[in-house]
Amino acid sequence: MEELRERVWKGSINVEVMLSDSIVLPNTSISEKCHHLVVLRESFLALYIPAIVRKLGQNVSSIYEDCYKQWWFECNGVPVSWEYPCGVLFDSSCNSFTASTDKDKDAYHLQMWKLHLCHGHKYPRGIIPLVDGLSQIQDYWKHQWKQACFILNGSAKRIMSLSIPDFEAFWLSILSRHQLDYMKIRDKMITLDRVKCVPIRFILPDIPILQPTVSTDTNKKSLNDVIDSLDINLQNDYKIVIQGIEVYSSENVLDLYNLFASIDGFLYIIIKR
Amino acid sequence: MNSGVLLSESETDTSEISTRQSDLISGDESIKGKLEEFSAKLNELRLGDPNSDAEEQENSPGSKSQREESFESSENVSKSSTRPAGSITSIPDVGPLKTDLRIKIRLQPIGAVPQIQPRVCQISANQQFLALTKFLCKRLKRKHIHCYINNAFAPALNQNIGDLWSQFKVNDELIVSYCESVAFG
């Protein structure tokens, strides 16, 4: 189980970031307006903006004062939210998800997430403006964890009773990628056999994100039970993807949470056709 | 998108109307006659007056002008769908779920910020939390307002209010505290 958690923690995505045509200087070569990087699935896309701006900033025509403010990503012309973990964004936007078992074929196949970096004084619809940089990301993450803690325990007491150094260490563990530090503090908020409800978000095609109440009144509640309780019609040939892995609907939902919960305390379940 | 997003409890208090409806069901006279009587009574009470409707809607974030203002992209807060990545903007704001459900919100001030009347409002369950925040900003005439659920956490602006109500309701009411500065950091 620890190995699986470690693989989830270290999971990464190849990303190609291209400066948007609207902000790139004329006659800029492709190599000067393009940057390749590896982002961690369990991190926030906005955390990478300063590094990308430092790399590509000299080829930007618009004037910018801040490495976070007024920047955003687009994927196929659609704005990409910064407030969800990278892996969730990738899994939900990637249409070519396949659970291939052909290792030889996979060895020659490099999956690349192609994004455009945009800048403007007016944010597009669908994007929460990032006006306060890193502290806004931290603040957002903190309140997501408070919400998750409330769902798990029926109150936010556990997280609110964390000391300030503990909370800072919790955030720093994400920035500095110290899984042991992260798990140590996470475990203070979660006692698996006392969990009241499971913080889950469903990302489905064509409808807004669902955040159902998933109580643990029965210990063996499966993912299928949860999906059945949602008031939605799903086609028979759908796939359930968590952390980029196709999972069976018969899996226990609490076990899935324990293994695959994201860095904001929620388990993201992506339903793909 | 539903109109009339928020209604006060007092505005939706229909006890007298309910009594008249029960009379209609149990009465010996024809239903048509009773309906006419009911309609006349409504006219007396001016409930059907379009002018009074407009006044009520002025105080509701669901009125057209305010809704437009709430959801138009602005410098500080833009409208955001609850859908990440690929298909964010292709998703309609009103999902197919809970379209007709209205939920109760209990508004509680923190610190020196004034209490909004009425304290309990109703809002369409398919709205995003952003709609409530904008409503509070307008009613309190403040540029920014901090909102918390159950005096514990601030939800994301793009979270569905119906989901929040389902998970965090107390006595069928979602308790939303609001203040001018950060209260629960």
Image (spheres, coloured by chain):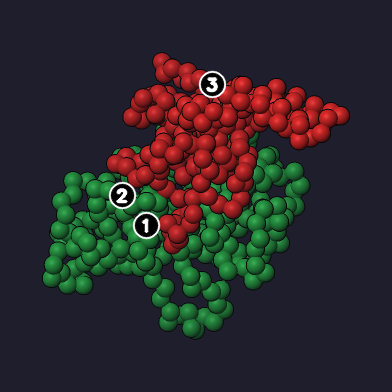
Chain colours: A green, B red
Question: What distance separates the C-alpha of mark 1 from that of mark 2?
Answer: 9 Å
Question: What distance separates the C-alpha of mark 3 from that of mark 2?
Answer: 34 Å
Query: Residue B158, percent across and down?
Result: 46, 44
- Residue in the picture at 76% in, 30% down: B34
Decide which of B130, A245 is in the foreground and name it: B130
Q: Residues within 10 Å of mark 3 (few under 14, many from 20)?
A: few
Query: Residue A183, percent across and down?
Result: 52, 46
Element type at marker 3? Answer: loop
- Residue in the picture at 71% in, 56% down: A228
Residue B136, compared with residue B5, is above or below; it is above
CB under 8 Å between callouts 1 and 2? yes
Give the numbered dot on residue A123: 2
Q: Chain of mark 3?
A: B
Q: Is residue A138 visible to the viewer in this orientation of the structure?
A: no
Name the residue tied to disc 3. Answer: B118
Name the amino acid type tagged 2: Tyr
Q: In the image, is A194 to the left or to the right of A160? A: right
